[in-house]
Image (cartoon, helix red, strand yellow):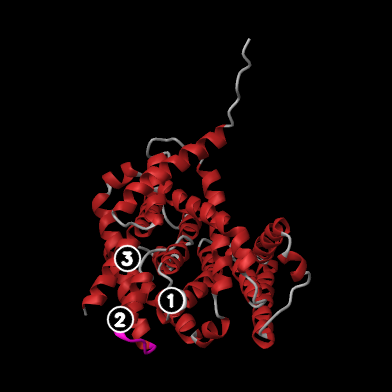
Amino acid sequence: MIAAINIDPVLSKFVILSMVIITVGFVLRIFKQPAMVTYIVVGILVGPNGFAVITDESLITNLGSLGLVLLLFFIGMEIHLPNLITNWKVSVFGTIIQIAVSIFIVWLLGQYFNWNLNQVVMLGFVISLSSTAVIVKLLQERNEMQTKAGQNVLGVLLVQDVLIVPMIIILGYMSGEKPDTSDVLKQIFGGIFITGIIIYILKKKEIKLPFMGFLRKDHEMQVFVAFALCFGFSIITALLGLSSALGAFVAGIILASTKSTKWVHDSLHAFKIMFVALFFVSVGMLIDLKFLQENAFKVSVLVLMVFIVNYSINVLIMRLFRNNWKISMYAGALLSQIGEFSFILGATGYYAGIIKNDDYQLIISAIALTLLISPFWISLTRKIIRLT
């Protein structure tokens, strides 16, 4: 009698997912599309709203969140901290202006759609956040991380990642839920802790980690040390009520200050590719084709409005801080989509009763579509800049 062969269902789904990514990626590469477009399209195809090959969205989403953490970790290792600090005015004031103007524009639209103040503020927060995952991936693929536009945009993204915490607190107040005093104190301590680390690195300029000589000779130990640093700092900042991705970024900065990051790239690069791909696949799985078909006009108008508004605001902000028109236009295009952290704000508003289910679905669709369309929008802007 032949014994039954038990195949792990999770393993088989990941094999299918990999095969679909290879097939779709081959086709889209012919049309010179970036990898993230491949992943989002694959998410649409294999997700519950497509062929339902993968229906466990939480598994892909949770693994995808690790991709964001690893992505910020690698960004930290590539950041030149003095340059980032030099551009702090663009990062801080530019982000605050972006949020304020976004809320004002949504308020103007709210006069027509009869939105209340809570809805206006929440939607303003949602559209004001840009995508770290999309922008960094494009900058890395084009070797533009160290350009002036790249540094300005990265600074804005990092400030946005920090400000998501007070945004969530504000939405909590609006829903009648006041944050616990201990949580606020933890977040304040977390901010002081991170600021202290950055100041220490700026003063020391180079940090020497213990056992560096030993680590250079032991590849297996390198993998575990890199993982411990990345996710260890992520857990610390998460426990302090801050973004886990922010902790990974700080860990990356610490490693960059050791002047020895090659072994980390070698150890974790493959993991980063896998988990970042899963993040974009999870975005594709959120796109409900039936909802899009039934609300095509409303979604299209919202997506177009987001690109035009975000692009215009960021171009003017970059010009305000004395960047030339080409840099300003490119930075504006990079920051024009809605970011992945806006999913959190949308869910917070929905569960707090600020928006209803249809509005929540509309927000999810708009975020996912702007992430999908963003590479095309940025490429179009690049071509226009070359012609001017």
Check disc 1 and report the residue beneath it: 150
* Relative to 86, 303 lies left or right: left
The quarter of the displayed image where residue 153 is located: bottom left
**Which of the two marks, 1 or 3, is nearer to us in this view?**
1
Check disc 2 and report the residue beneath it: 326
Residue appearing at x 76%, y 70% in the figure: 213
Task: Mark 1 or mark 3: name the one nearer the start of the chain.
Answer: 1
Q: Is mark 1 on a helix, strand or loop?
A: helix
* Of 216 and 382, the residue lying toward us: 216
Compared with 344, 187 (above or below) is below
* Relative to 205, 152 lies left or right: left
> Crowding near pointer 2: few (<14 within 10 Å), some, many (20+)?
some
Q: Which amino acid does label 1 sit on?
A: Gly
Whole-number angstrom distance, CA of label 2 to CA of label 1: 13 Å
**Which of the two marks, 3 or 2, is nearer to us in this view?**
2
Number of marks: 3
* Relative to 171, 240 lies left or right: right
Check disc 3 and report the residue beneath it: 306
Residue 340, image x and y in percent?
46, 60
Residue 136 magenta-highlighted? no
* Of 22 and 315, the residue lying toward us: 22
Whole-number angstrom distance, CA of label 3 to CA of label 2: 21 Å
User: Looking at this rendering, what residue extends furthest in the front direction?
Assistant: 217
> Crowding near pointer 1: few (<14 within 10 Å), some, many (20+)?
many
Residue 69, image x and y in percent?
57, 61
Whole-number angstrom distance, CA of label 1 to CA of label 3: 21 Å
Task: Mark 2 or mark 1: name the one nearer the start of the chain.
Answer: 1
Q: What residue type is labelled 3?
A: Val
Q: What element carries label 2?
A: helix
Residue 376 visible in the shown view: yes
Task: Mark 3 or mark 2: name the one nearer the start of the chain.
Answer: 3
